[in-house]
Amino acid sequence: MSDQPQERRQFSRVVFDAWAELQQGDKSWQAAVVDVSLKGLLVREPADWQIDTAQPIHAAIRLDSSATIQMSVLARHQENGLIGFECQHIDIDSISNLRRLVELNLGDPELLERQLGALGGVH
């Protein structure tokens, strides 16, 4: 995991005030979400953060009482108390919820469609 992320963003990030539950094996943490995109997630580092960086983490973000975004992520960078994750897998319900969230924040349907087209590697 690199300590110095490079700015190569091709997906718009939505600043989002929510909590994510992060889970790896029998360990779990609550982390404040800084932003979320179609390709990943940025959170504030939780207390007692000790993970196996080679193994995926399950991230669940509750949007409201009936909608969540759940994805399998890998930690890609950690710097200044923030952890950046890359999405490895997201289910169809979660991608629909995330798409709607991004669409509401972008205000540009064509930009959203270009970003969705670039997702190729996310299952």
Image (tube, grey):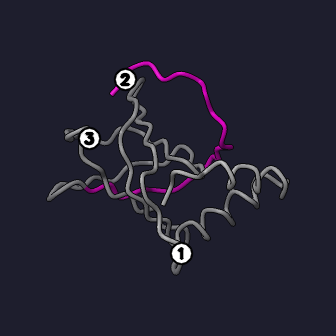
Residue extending farthest to the bottom is 66
Residue extending farthest to the top is 4
Real-space Cα separation, disc 1 to disc 3, in angstroms: 30 Å
Amino acid at circle 3: Ala
Q: First in sequence: mark 3 or mark 2? A: 2
Few, some or many residues within 10 Å of mark 3 (<14, 14–19, 20+): few
> In the image, what residue occupies the spot 66% across and 63% down?
99
Left or right side of 76 for 35: right
- Label 2: which residue? 2
- Label 3: which residue? 47
Residue 86: x, y in percent?
Answer: 45, 43
Left or right side of 81 for 55: left
Residue 3 belongs to magenta span: yes
Label of residue 93 in the image: 1
Identify the element where label 2 is drawn. loop
Across the whole image, how many numbered discs are drawn on residues?
Answer: 3
Q: First in sequence: mark 1 or mark 3? A: 3
Q: First in sequence: mark 1 or mark 2? A: 2
